[in-house]
């Protein structure tokens, strides 16, 4: 049984206080509007800094915030900005005081007592305002439905792209001087492969230099390296000319402190990919490079590895984790493989295969 995705979400409570004045200087009206994000849970030892596996954001985490004019109905299609200063606002979490600081586009300084909004003209203000968000903040983003992404590269540059599920039907806020609470619940956009390594024999230590995911020549499953993500609908538009396919994606772990493994417990390394329907056995091939040498091992991923019981199609799903467990002998050969599929990035897997 697959658990619901809700446990993997990042919950952020945002309190927006709306006033009749829009103050960007240090002399802000204390009766004006401000935004507070109430989150502070540090990751456990051994977790990556680039990938969130808990339920809260950590110190230094960045959000991109948009304030739009609300539209008729529940969904959005026009995305008219409330102000050009409220497009892709950078919110940075500071754990020392459990607070967020905000930087408006083009500003050289930040502030931590909130975002102030001016009440729009009655002729243009009909439905209120809406707040949309994604994470992490990326410089230069101008639309919430076109967030650029890339997978692979150096481990330290890996981006765990997330979006607020409320973006699809944001709460409409009417500025009236009173406090307005907007709850944002973040979901993972990518699929997460946890690649576990363990030695078969004792007194053996190995290290992972890189992990590659290769597309089989002639395979029918696409492998995307970069493109844009629609953080409103929470989907990748694969028919877009901005989506870029490749034949191999590689993440390098040579500088990662947890890349060594022995015959004790499995050591897991994270590997992010674009969610995709998986069409054929061996369409994707995992390849591992060990000890900074040309010592390599390969594993073709089977449909049965990732297919969830009760579903007709196999796919790598957004927000799901796929935990591969590899045991290696001294000849850098795969001796045993187990695969777990879970809708939760943190908890123990709910399905296991053994080959």
Image: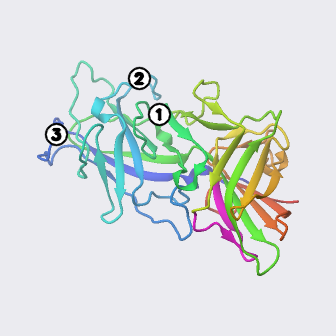
Q: Nearest the camera: 19 or 200?
A: 200
Tell me, what colour scheme is on the image?
Answer: rainbow
Residue 273 belongs to the span the image colors magenta: no
Q: Nearest the camera: 288 or 161?
A: 288
Q: Are marks 2 and 3 in contact (CB under 8 Å)?
A: no
Q: Which residues are magenta?
A: 256-271
Kindly state the secondary structure of the residue where label 3 is placed.
loop
Q: Nearest the camera: 21 or 189?
A: 189
Q: Position of residue 206 (x, y in %)?
A: 72, 70
Horizontal arrangement in the rendering, residue 178 relative to residue 277 (left or right): left
* Image quadrant assignment for residue 239: top right
Residue where numbered disc 2 is placed = 72
Kindly state the secondary structure of the residue where label 1 is placed.
loop
Residue where numbered disc 1 is placed = 169
Q: Quadrant of the C terminus?
A: bottom right
The residue located at (84%, 47%) in the rendering is 302
Kindly state the secondary structure of the residue where label 2 is placed.
loop
Q: Is residue 17 above or below residue 121?
A: below
Residue where numbered disc 3 is placed = 23
Horizontal arrangement in the rendering, residue 53 relative to residue 66 (left or right): right
Query: Nearer the N terminus, badge 2 or badge 3?
Result: 3
Q: Quadrant of the N terminus?
A: bottom right
* Image quadrant assignment for residue 64: top left
The residue located at (52%, 51%) in the rendering is 157
């Amino acid at each position: 049984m697959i658990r619901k995705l809700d446990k993997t979400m990042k919950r952020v409570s945002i309190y927006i206080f709306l006033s009749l004045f829009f103050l960007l200087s240090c002399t802000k009206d204390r009766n004006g509007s401000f935004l507070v994000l109430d989150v502070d849970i540090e990751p456990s030892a051994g977790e990556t800094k680039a990938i969130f596996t808990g339920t809260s954001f950590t110190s230094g985490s960045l959000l991109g915030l948009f304030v739009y004019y609300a539209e008729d109905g529940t969904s959005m299609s026009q995305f008219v900005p409330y102000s050009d200063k409220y497009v892709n606002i950078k919110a940075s979490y500071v754990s020392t005081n459990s607070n967020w600081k905000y930087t408006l586009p083009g500003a050289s300084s930040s502030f931590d007592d909130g975002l102030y909004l001016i009440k729009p003209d009655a002729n243009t203000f009909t439905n209120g305002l809406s707040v949309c968000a994604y994470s992490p903040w990326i410089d230069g983003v101008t639309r919430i439905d076109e967030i650029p992404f890339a997978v692979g590269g150096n481990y330290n540059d890996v981006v765990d792209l997330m979006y607020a599920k409320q973006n699809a039907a944001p709460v409409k806020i009417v500025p009236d001087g009173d406090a307005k609470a907007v709850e944002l619940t973040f979901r993972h956009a990518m699929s997460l492969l946890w690649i576990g390594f363990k030695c078969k024999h004792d007194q053996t230590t190995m290290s992972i230099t890189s992990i590659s995911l290769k597309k089989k020549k002639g395979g029918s499953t696409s492998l995307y390296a970069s493109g844009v993500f629609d953080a409103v609908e929470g989907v990748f538009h694969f028919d877009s000319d901005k989506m870029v396919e490749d034949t191999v994606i590689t993440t390098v772990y040579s500088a990662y402190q947890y890349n060594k493994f022995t015959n004790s417990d499995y050591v897991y390394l994270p590997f992010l990919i674009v969610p995709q329907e998986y069409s054929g056995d061996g369409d994707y091939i995992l390849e591992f490079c060990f000890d900074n040498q040309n010592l390599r091992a390969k594993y073709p991923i089977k449909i049965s590895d990732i297919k969830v019981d009760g579903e007709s199609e196999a796919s790598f799903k957004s927000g799901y984790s796929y935990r591969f467990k590899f045991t290696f002998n001294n000849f850098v050969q795969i001796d045993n493989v187990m695969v777990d599929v879970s809708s939760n990035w943190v908890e123990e897997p709910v399905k296991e295969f053994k080959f």
